[in-house]
Amino acid sequence: IRTFDMVTSTPEKLSGQAADKMQAGVILLDFMRRELNLSNSSVLGACQKLQEAVGLPNLAPRYAIDAPADAPDGSSRPTLSLSALLKQYGICLTANQAYHQMAKLGIVEQRERYSRTAINNIKKFWSLTAKGCMFGKNITSPANPRETQPHFFESRFPELLKLLDTVH
C-alpha cells in the first residue's frame, strides 16, 4: 500500500517540477532567441529538447523553414559556413578577416560567454545581427549550445561579397 501511495502521489510532485522546469526553459529560450538571433531550426531543436527534458510528448514539427525574410516563396535556402563559401568563390580572405569586415558593416557582432578553459575564462564567438539575418542564419554551435555559428545563404553570398568590397 505504501508503494502504491508513493507512486500515485509522485506525478503531482513531478508535474510541479516539470512545470517549473518548462517555464524556466521557455524564458531562457525566448531570451536566447532574441539575444542571439537564433534561426527557426535552432529554436525548434531547443523546443524539442525542452519537451523531452520535462517529459512532454514531442508535438513540435520535424523541421523549420529558414529563409531570408524577403524570400518570395518562403522556402528554406541552403546555407554554408563563411570559410566554405569564401573557398567556393575563390576569395583570398580568411573567415576571420571577413568577419571583421562584416562587423564594420553591422552584419555580425562578436559575442562572449563564460568558459572554464578559455583565456581569462571568456570565449568569443561571432553572431549575425538582425541586419545580418538577411544574409544568413545563426545556428546553435555543435560545440556549445550557448553560442551561435553563422551560416550564410548561398543565394545571398554574391550580394554580401559586394558589400564587403565597400569596407576599407
Image (cartoon, rainbow, N blue to C red):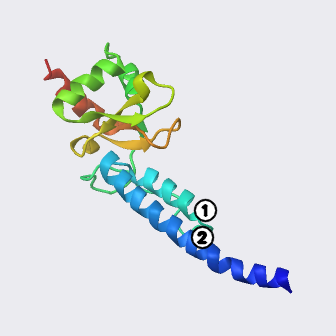
Give the total of numbered labels.
2
Residue 57 x %, y %:
61, 70
| Front residue of this view, candidates 16 and 124 | 16
- Residue that lies at the very extreme toward the right in this rendered image: 1
Secondary structure beneath label 2? loop
Would residue 125 appear left or right of 18 to someone viewing this image?
left
Residue at (43%, 28%) from the top-left corner? 121
Quadrant of the rendering where the C terminus is positioned: top left
Amino acid type at circle 2 is Leu
Would residue 36 appear left or right of 131 to someone viewing this image?
right
Label 2 crowding class (10 Å Cα cut-off): few <14, some 14-19, many 20+? few
Q: Say above or below: 122 vs 65.
A: above
Amino acid type at circle 1 is Glu
Q: Say above or below: 144 vs 9.
A: above
Which mark, by number, is residue 126? none
Identify the image quadrant of residue 86. top left
Residue 140 x %, y %:
45, 43
Is residue 135 visible to us here?
A: yes
Would residue 92 appear left or right of 116 to someone viewing this image?
left
Q: Are marks 2 and 1 in contact (CB under 8 Å)?
A: yes
Q: Alpha-carbon distance for marks 2 and 1?
A: 6 Å
Which mark, by number, is residue 56? 2
Is residue 89 visible to us here?
A: no
Residue at (46%, 25%) from the top-left corner? 118
